[in-house]
Image: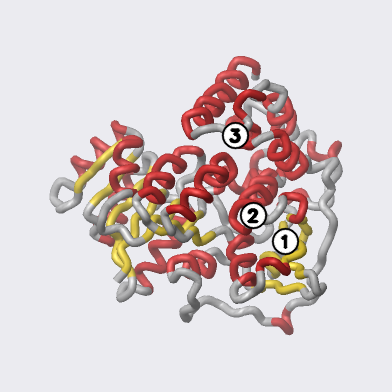
Amino acid sequence: MKNLVILGSTGSIGTQTLEIVAEKKEDFKVLALAAYSNVTLIESQIRMYSPKYAVLFKEDAASELATKVKDLPVKVLSGMDGLIEISTLDECDMLVASMVGMIGIRPTIAAVNAGIDIALANKETLVTAGHIIVPLAKEKHVNIFPVDSEHSAIYQCLKAQDRSMVDKILLTASGGPFLGRKYDELKDVTLNDALNHPNWSMGKKITIDSASLVNKGLEVIEAKWLFDVDIKDVEVIVHPQSIIHSMVQFKDNAVLAQLGLPDMKLPIQYALYEGNRRTMPEKKIDFFALSELDFKRVDHETFKGIKLAVSSYNRGYIYTTVYNAANEIANRYFQEGKIKFLQIYDIIEDALTLNFDDKLTPTLDEILEAESRVYDYISTKY
């Protein structure tokens, strides 16, 4: 029986993780749940999965939750202290890090320091602090199992392979809802347009990142850290059907690919079982129903997300934090109707003009200070 702590239990990855737990109850026990502020959903999760601990980051929401579950033997915590406390519990066997945003970095680092394996679905953790977390995980003998479908695919393709023979990582992208459109055709797209993803059902933030291809920029940086490759050897290929989740090209010119329907349960389950396969009741691929599998080049002039990500990485690790933080606030502004879609790129490019040359290999505190500086800069200008 594996004890799980789930950060982000009310989000898309968190709720699907809990569905797997319900299906595989003989293998998993929920030790703790955490979310940002969704009292109603986490209360129902507590009543269904009986964790010992629950955390809501917002203190007022945690107080409300404590009142609602006072009939249950669950300890309710709040804030960053609460997240770190449950992420370092002695009984914890695996931390599912699926909170969206920078909020997940400190708890993840704390878990790694405590020697706890990570099922990683939080892109920001490695994008901003990969230079800290990857060496620390090696030092503490901690395994990081990727949950993103693309990184899970790469991980599966690399199992039992000679890593020295890897030539290139081929990271697939669906292209999002605006595939094929040119820059001028994106000037007046709406929030609903951006949220109309053709293949995947995700939260708003990630869906918008998919539309701008910023999510793929984040994944390129993440792949560099997860698989110890040079960032120039991570190539993005647009594959609209989302059947091939990613590929690995080897130096003998062989290419291994992982195929599956666009369903996050497979990579989540694969991570929970530490890279071992278990049966799943979900629908299988019908190859005879697949009319075609297309591959296209990324239009980097229209969709600048990947190009800006690689540029930020090449300037120094602190600039990946700038890239990520600028996108977070730009994404939120777009959701709130404060900016147009193409201004997401403008805001990221503007933030990358800030000078951090003295902090190219930042500490955790410097990463969080840079995030705050970017937020302040953008909020006063836009």
* Residue 251 vertical placement versus 122 (above, below): below
Quarter of the image that includes the N terminus? bottom left
Name the residue carrying label 1: 169
Tag 2 and tag 1, C-beta contact below 8 Å: yes
Mark 2 lies on residue: 223
Count of marks placed on residues: 3
Which of these two is toward me, 90 or 38? 90
Q: Residue at x 81, y 67 (%)?
A: 294
Q: Hey, what amino acid is under mark 1?
A: Ile
Q: Give percent across and percent down for residue 159.
A: 59, 73
**Where is residue 219 drawn, in percent x and y?**
64, 51
Residue 71 appears in the picture as rendered: yes
Circle 1/circle 3 CB separation < 8 Å: no
Between disc 1 and disc 3, the foreground one is 3
The residue closer to the viewer here, 76 or 41, is 76
User: Label 2 crowding class (10 Å Cα cut-off): few <14, some 14-19, many 20+?
Assistant: many
Q: Is residue 330 visible?
A: no
Q: Residue furthest bottom?
A: 288
At which x and y percent is residue 331? 62, 35
Residue at x-position 72% and y-position 52%: 230
Residue 283, relative to residue 358: is it above or below?
Answer: below
Which residue in the structure is indicated by mark 3?
361
Q: Position of residue 339 (x, y in %)?
A: 67, 27
Quick check: 46 left or right of 182?
Answer: left
Residue 337 vs 205, above or below: the answer is above
Q: If you read the primary sequence from the N terminus, does the residue marked by circle 3 or circle 2 appear first?
A: 2
Looking at the image, residue 182 sits to the left or right of residue 378; the answer is right
